[in-house]
Image: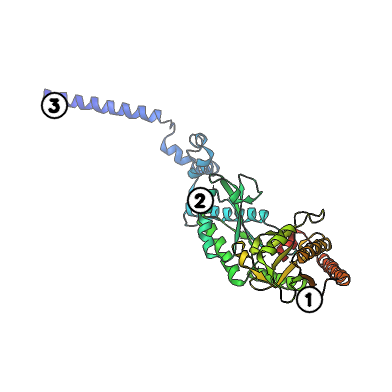
Amino acid sequence: MTLRLALLLVSLIILGLIGLICHQKYRRSGIKKRPNDLVAEMDDSSELEQQVNTPFFTENIVSDIPAESSAVLQPAEDQPQEESQSPTLTTSLQELMDNKRIAQQLAEQMLPEYDDNDFITEHVAVIPNVNNTVKQINKVTLHLMRDSDREIEVFAAVKNRQEFVPIFSLKDKTKVRHLKTVLQLKDNKGVVDEKQLEQYQQFVEKLANQFACEYKFALDDAKQVADVCVKLSEFIKDHDQITILYILAQPDDAFSGEALKAAATAAGLELGEFDFFHLVSSTETNQGDKVYSLANMYKPGSFSLELLDKFSTTGLCAFMVPALLKDPVSGFREMCTSCKYIADQLNGVLTTNRRELLDEDNYIAICSDITAHKDKLNAAGVVTGSELAQKLFA
């Protein structure tokens, strides 16, 4: 009996302690109204709306989170619905497109601009942002040039400058920023053909791909380039002129190689390109320019120093391209004086291209032809002796 009373007393004490603990927790929770009281106040819709529209974490949490992270904590219904795709992939594609556009714009700034009146003699391309050494670029270009029938010029711009210089003038370790390549549409082999244009196109494409770069041509339309080449061919054919004189041996006579060399050297000529003799002008107007060339009248026309002691011919051909001289009439006068000296030294005869003696009347007639030719070129926009004239008629 005593034991039962003791257990009952202990149970009452435990229940009392539990009740006391629950009461303390209730007070600390901050709820001062009973559940029935809260239910009674549900009729106040404005207060309920305010409680619903204000998330419980806004005041205490969002204020402590950086602005770029707070959007994650907004209610789901406030978030815009995005397409199901990889943000990283989308960004990378956009960056690639932007970089390509910027590279194309940069290339355009470095390319020459043409109008309808220009004589276009070059096919130019620019490869921006190569960012590689001269040594590595030369290694690639020399390999690619093996597939081209025409010479391709390569120029480089270093650092942030857009001034291009021949790449061969730079040291191997120089860091190149941009590249420019040039194909002359006309050289001493003539105007380029369709095959050679295609070779150049492939050269530029492969060079740019080797360095993972964009590229752009000044003439980016194949038909436009073909039309330019046709225009060049027609213009050269219509305006090309060569002034020719002959130095002929007397009947039953011939010029020996040794005598020819002595006479040509005394007249100021030197053996040079194509194994022809050439005279360089000493006059003020044409100073430093090649006046004329002297060749054998018979094919192949060239001379060989090693074989001159065994060489002989009955005629020599002197020829001049008036378009290449600033003052072609003065150049012709030099040519006549020089050829007359050689003819006299070899006991030969100086004639026109029609094999007529070069007398005063023929001399005046040829000078008139040269003057008319110069005027015709000037009217077409080509100044004799200019860089453009050199490209067209050299």
Distance from Cα at disc 3 to Cα at disc 1: 157 Å
Q: Is residue 9 left or right of residue 342?
A: left
Q: What secondary structure is marked by label 3?
A: helix
Identify which residue, 202 or 392, lies in the foreground. 392
- Residue 291, given in percent of the width and then of the height, sits at 76, 61
Q: How far is the residue under mark 2 from the one under mark 3?
A: 63 Å
**For the residues bearing labels 1 and 2, Cβ distance under 8 angstroms:** no
Query: In the image shown, does 244 or 375 lie closer to the viewer?
Result: 244
Closest to the camera, between mark 2 and mark 3, is 2
Q: Which residue is mark 2?
A: 77
149 above or below 84? below
Q: Which comes before the other along the chain, label 1 or label 2?
A: 2
SS for callout 2 = helix
Mark drawn on residue 4: 3
Residue 35 spot, x, y in % from top left? 41, 38
Q: Name above or below for residue 33 compared with residue 388.
A: above
Residue closer to the observer: 344 or 210: 344
Distance (Cα) linking label 1 and label 2: 102 Å
Give how far across and how far down residue 311 sits, in percent.
Answer: 63, 68
User: Residue 159, relative to residue 105: is it above or below?
Assistant: above
Which x, y percent locates residue 318? 74, 67
Q: Is residue 136 above or below residue 196?
A: above
Secondary structure beneath dot 1 equals loop
Q: Report the amino acid beneath label 3.
A: Arg
Q: Are marks 2 and 3 in contact (CB under 8 Å)?
A: no
Q: Quadrant of residue 258?
A: bottom right
Tag on residue 355? 1
Report which quarter residue 50 is drawn in.
Answer: top right
Disc 3 to disc 1: CB gap under 8 Å:
no
First in sequence: mark 3 vs mark 1: 3
